[in-house]
Image (spheres, rainbow, N blue to C red):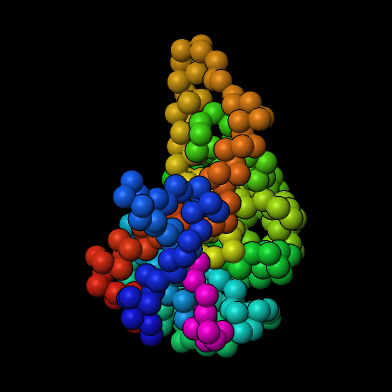
Amino acid sequence: MAPAATILDGQSDNNKKYGGLGKAKDGRTFSVRSYPTFKTLEEERRYRKEHLAAAFRVFADHGYVEGITGHISVRDPILPDHFWLNPISVHFAHLKTSDLVLVNPDGEVVEGERPIQPAAFAIHAELLKARPDINSAAHAHSIYGKTYSAFGRELEMITQDSLRFYMQHAVYKNFGGIVFNREEGIRIAEALGTTNKAVILQNHGLLTVGKTPDEAAWWFLALENLCQVQLLADAAAAGSGNQKIIIDEEASVFTNKQSGTPEKGWLAFQTYYDDVLIRSKGDFLQ
């Protein structure tokens, strides 16, 4: 298990890439945190698992826990057609790296001591298979996400934060109950498409993806907040008769390039990771 100092490494001079100025008045330059490099695939596996475990702790902190629902995955770097997933019987608030389960393409547990959700496998197996550009997916039954999902429509581009998802989210309209078969997982993957990072599952909730569990988790946090904003804006508009102002395409495209990249998604999550690391004293790394 990597020490905390190693986990917090990943600093490099990526200021232009991340949009930071990175220079002090006295001439000093600063670096912006970025995804680390690894000497071995074993090191990367450990990193992915530790950040996946942290994502569950963050979800618990935000109340994205309801019984045994919800799951986050990450592709294994050594066995790319396998992925790590949470077991069905561990609360997000207590989940540790050692609790994670490695699953093969047939849904069999390769490493781990507990069973997984059939729905989790059906969704994540097909998403990761259909999208080799992503390594992680996150789904939970969050309050505002599942409330907004009842409308079966995309978000409106009404705030700066909405633009993180400009032309990068979709709606899956074919709700057919709990996802127990891979055909449903295939249809969800098709709805997500080849470039989107989120899909609103009608009458169900939210699902986000990313190159890292950090990114997928951050997009989920952001999308849940935006669903709350959309619901509030819709209610306010209906009550007052005022019209919502939609941000124009030029500003939407520009802002999305500044705040909607995988690097920004990963970076945004690191403050949450640090918070969990400090408050838990690294308990989730075990």
Q: The N terminus lies in which quarter of the figure? A: bottom left
Residue stretch in magenta: 35-45
Determine whether, in the image, residue 233 is placed left or right of residue 135. Answer: left
Residue nearest the observer in this picture, 212 or 26: 26
Q: Residue at x 33, y 63 (%)?
A: 274
Residue 269 rendering spot, x and y as whole percentages = 43, 57
Residue nearest the observer in this picture, 203 or 110: 110
Is residue 146 at all visible to an observer of this figure? Answer: no
38 w.r.t. 245: above or below: below
Q: Residue at x 67, y 30 (%)?
A: 249
Q: The C terminus lies in which quarter of the figure? A: bottom left
Residue 279 rendering spot, x and y as whole percentages = 24, 65
Rendering quarter of residue 186: bottom right
Is residue 195 at all visible to an observer of this figure? Answer: yes
Q: Quick check: is 108 in the magenta stretch?
A: no
Residue nearest the observer in this picture, 4 or 180: 4
Q: Residue at x 46, y 15 (%)?
A: 239
Residue 215 rendering spot, x and y as whole percentages = 52, 59
Residue 174 rendering spot, x and y as whole percentages = 70, 48
Q: Quick check: is 39 in the magenta stretch?
A: yes
Rendering quarter of residue 277: bottom left
Q: Residue at x 44, y 29 (%)?
A: 232
121 w.r.t. 238: above or below: below
User: Number of callouts in the render?
Assistant: 0
Q: Residue furthest front?
A: 27
